[in-house]
Amino acid sequence: GRRTYRFFEPEMDAKVRERRQLESDLRHAIALGGLEGGLEVYYQPCLSLKDDRITGCEALVRWRHPERGMVSPAEFIPIAEDTGLINEIGEWVLATACRDAANWPDDIRLAVNVSPVQFKSGTLALKIMAALAASNLPASRLELEITEAVLIRDDDAALTILHQLRAIGVRIALDDFGTGYSSLSYLHRFPFDKIKIDRCFVDDIAGPDGSASIVQAVVNLATARRMTTTAEGVETEEQQRLLRALGCSEMQGYLFSAAKPADKVLELFALHRSR
Ligand code: C2E
Ligand code: CA
Ligand code: CA
Ligand code: CA
């Protein structure tokens, strides 16, 4: 009611002001050209559970704010999505990541997160093709991570874009599977190459009433539809062992490596290869 609203007003004001400030700082960061504005792309490797090879890396954006220090993408991506700034940020991340990945061994893929908002602009497919052409990265080495939010409105436009990208060889992964409103109908609506099993299922996979049976069901489903599976947020040896036993194809998580800057991830490739 009115009273409650008045009661919370000062706090709400502060929240709104902080959000506006972050928005304008973010706008400034992009105008400066990304890197100069403190934006950076880190890469988290993904490991095959079959043979311990590094199969790919996921690009994760970082923002070093001049006063606040590191701001988490969990905080600034939603702001960027609400304001449309995600279109510029996403384009910058894609171009930067494709350029970096062109220097990787050619059996290592690049995965890039794409926001549902970026599908609304109508130029996404063109921007992706431009980033591939400018970097000389083969389309087959790029994988896009999308969430079911992209498909939620049964959006024909988004499906058309996904099919266009698929046709040139780009792979499509369904991110955060099992969270939000995800339903099996999304798997039916689009032939994904990969399902990323959300961290929440990995977190309690080892418990007595754990999620092992759910992970098993997802892996079986994926296998039947010729999709691979990547488990997110793997932090312990036991989780790794269970995931391998359940037939999950790949894993990502702090157990192997957190996301690292481009030069550090190159060092990791070399080290891992000569191990
Ligand atoms: P996500 O796509 O689900 O990315 C995985 C997140 O889990 C990353 O957080 C990663 O650093 C973190 N993580 C990886 N391994 C572990 C682990 O073993 N334990 C734990 N506790 N966490 C782990 P990050 O980098 O903070 O990103 C958060 C979210 O922000 C991402 O979730 C993604 O939704 C979004 N995001 C990040 N970069 C981009 C981007 O370039 N574009 C878009 N659209 N979204 C992005
Ligand atoms: Ca992701
Ligand atoms: Ca995820
Ligand atoms: Ca997420």
Image: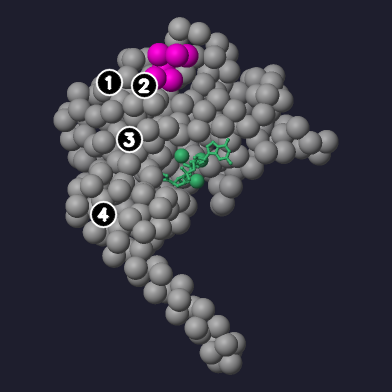
Residue holding disc 3: 163
Q: Nearer the viewer, mark 2 or mark 3?
A: 2
- The spot of residue 200 in percent (x, y) is 64, 42
The colouring scheme, among rainbow, by chain, secondary structure or one colour, is: one colour
Disc 2 residue type (three-letter): Leu
Q: Secondary structure at mark 3?
A: helix
Residue drawn at (26%, 23%) of the image: 102
Residue holding disc 2: 266
Question: Mark 4–mark 2 contact, CB under 8 Å?
Answer: no
Residue drawn at (45%, 10%) of the image: 273
Residue holding disc 1: 103
Label 2 and label 3: CA atoms lie apart by 32 Å
Q: Secondary structure at mark 4?
A: helix
Question: Camera-side residue: 92 or 122?
Answer: 92
Residue holding disc 4: 29
Q: Is residue 147 left or right of residue 106?
A: right
Residue 188 is at least partly visible in this image? no
> Which of the two discs, 1 and 4, labels the residue nearer the N terminus?
4
- In magenta, the rendered stretch is 266-272
